[in-house]
Amino acid sequence: EASNGAFGLGQIVTFDITVTNRGNQTVTGQIVEESIGNFVEGTGYVIGESGKTATITSIAPGEEIVLKASYTITEADILAGNLKNTAMVDNEKAEVTVPMEEEKADWTLVKRITNLSDTGEDEAFALDQTVEFDIVVTNTGNQTLVNHVVTETLGSFIQKDGYTVSNEGKTATISSLAPGMSITLKAEHIITEADIAADKLVNVATSGEKTTGEIPVPTEDPTEDWQIVKT
């Protein structure tokens, strides 16, 4: 369980279903049904093929048998916001409400330069060299991100599987990203004369209120050099 007493996406809920024989005769072959969970192995009962039913082999008057079941919280459960589980024996029902976390859209952005080694010992990009970037988006929430937009300030996105790039190359739209999954977006920028002349060159990727922060792009120092040949 989460610290707030609610179950989160992918967590397993376990149930105890206690059946008591309140009659005056032994009952054999009593079937217990489970609405959302699946029965797990225990003592005194046999699980059906579907996992949704369990048959108590024999229960004497006044005896109790505890059946075990479990269920894994899904994204649909989180979005529905209300999850109940019911066990049934003949016409007798027992229902419990499963506390769940509220739906939450959340993600992280991590950006890095992938080809700094191409610059040589000085690790600074020269005029007309291409800087390559990876922007990793990870879904840290409990619902699927759909048509999720990432914006690039300096570079231009390169079309790859899993996202589409706008005509100007400055935005990438991730079609779908399930909770816990990551996708790597590719971008690049060609160093210009203005980049070399600037005091500082940085790149930032943003998505909603999230940002990678400024990623410094090292460039060579401006130099003036020429050659005159006269014949």
Image (spheres, helix red, strand yellow):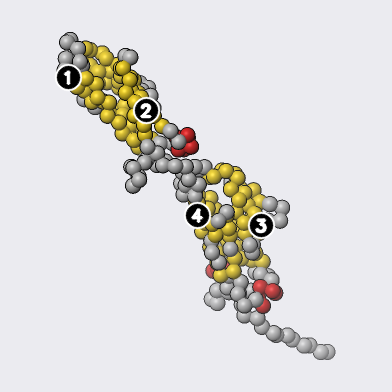
User: Spatial distance from mark 4 to mark 1, Cα to Cα?
Assistant: 54 Å
Identity, as a three-letter code, of the amino acid under mark 1: Glu
The residue drawn where x is 51% and y is 59% is 110
Q: Quadrant of the N terminus?
A: top left
Q: Residues within 10 Å of mark 4 (few under 14, many from 20)?
A: some
**Residue extending furthest toward the top:** 25
The residue carrying mark 1 is: 63
The residue carrying mark 2 is: 85
Residue 56 rendering spot, x and y as whole percentages: 25, 18
First in sequence: mark 1 vs mark 3: 1
Quadrant position of residue 169: bottom right
User: Spatial distance from mark 2 to mark 1, Cα to Cα?
Assistant: 24 Å
Q: Residues within 10 Å of mark 1 (few under 14, many from 20)?
A: few
Q: Secondary structure at mark 4?
A: strand
Is disc 3 in contact with disc 4, using a CB cutoff of under 8 Å?
Answer: no
Nearer to us of marks 4 and 2 is 2
Out of 161 and 80, give the one closest to the viewer: 80
Nearer to us of marks 4 and 1 is 1
